[in-house]
Amino acid sequence: MRIGELASQAGVSVRSLRYYEEQGLLTSTRSPSGQRHYTEDEVERVRFIQRLYGAGLSSRTIAEVLPCVDSPSERNSDEAFERLVQERDRMSRHIDELAQARDALDLLIDANRAHRAHLMPR
Amino acid sequence: MRIGELASQAGVSVRSLRYYEEQGLLTSTRSPSGQRHYTEDEVERVRFIQRLYGAGLSSRTIAEVLPCVDSPSERNSDEAFERLVQERDRMSRHIDELAQARDALDLLIDANRAHRAHLMPR
DNA sequence: CTAAGACCTGACATTGACGTCAGATGCAAG
DNA sequence: CTTGCATCTGACGTCAATGTCAGGTCTTAG
């Protein structure tokens, strides 16, 4: 499939796919005329990359971690594996922070709701 | 207290404090010579603002929500309150996404660890 | 008084993941 | 063949929070 097809299937822009390739997150075979071609598998790969971006990883970090995705069945570099664990932990900490922030908002909501309840009219 | 003191107590840069003021998140009284002065309370306010930034809210969103923080004991505009609830929900959804991403990383870690275990030497 | 350091305003620089545009080429349908 | 849409490369634009710098004023210790 060509780049437009992959983009729509994975739900990202064509621009993003070229950017991912530039960042070493994605590879493509080229037709004689230079157009990029992808296999079906790339759809999932792109979706996974999107998840990592959504989880706050940078292109560089994703690139460092991808070897473990590409061949979990091989022994990859210790750095890649270490980075993977490290990012998982960072995400866990971030989740905790977010949960705390959300709880703070919940308290605020309750406080505000309390003062709204008994002024129902208007 | 002056701006440098607030900055160090709240753990942010002086630049950021001036930016917060510019964005309407923070106010200051000015000395005759024009220097900003703050009360102790502002420390907590800044820390709270930092939390919201950390939780992914933009300056504008924080500004929209702050009325509910400043006077939860009054009836604030419906828009402010609605925004507050809306952001809380957005955060909850984001937390779920992050948790899913983390679980995906956990699976990867397990898969990789499995292939590392039995090649212990080296 | 004077030097050092904190503060002021205003402006330009940075970073990352894209958007967008220009100009050229490729490809499928009539 | 040609029209029109997809694709190519390369480059510049964007946005938000903050860094950084310049040139000037304030404050405080000695």
Image (cartoon, coloured by chain):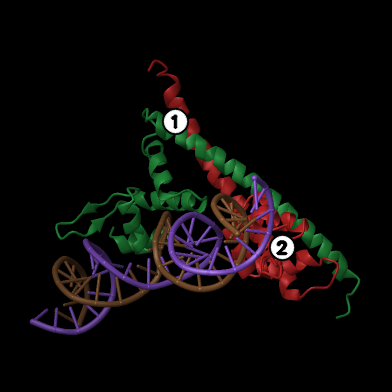
Chain colours: A green, B red, C brown, D purple
Give residue B64's position: percent from left, percent from top.
Answer: 68, 70
* Residue bearing mark 1: B112
Count of numbered circles on the image = 2
> Which residue sits at x=64%, y=49%?
B11
> Which residue sits at x=32%, y=64%?
A4
Name the side, left or right, on which B30 lies relative to C24: right
Give residue A63's position: percent from left, percent from top.
Answer: 38, 44
SS category of the residue bearing label 2: strand
User: Residue furthest toward the right?
Assistant: A118
The picture quadrant where one finds residue D3 is bottom left
Say which of B70 and D26 sits in front. D26
Q: Chain of mark 2?
A: B
The residues tagged by marks 2 and 1 sit, at their Cα atoms, a distance apart of 55 Å
Say which of A20 and A61 sits in front. A61
Tell us which disc is closer to us: 2 or 1: 2
* Residue bearing mark 2: B37
**Which amino acid, by three-letter code, is at mark 1?**
Asn
Rendered position, A68 above or below A39? above
Name the side, left or right, on which A4 lies relative to D15: left
Give the quarter of the figure containing the C terminus of chain B: top left
Q: Chain of mark 1?
A: B
Give the quarter of the figure containing the N terminus of chain B: bottom right
Name the side, left or right, on which A10 lies relative to D17: left
Q: Earlier in the sequence, mark 2 or mark 1?
A: 2
User: Residue furthest toward the top?
Assistant: B121
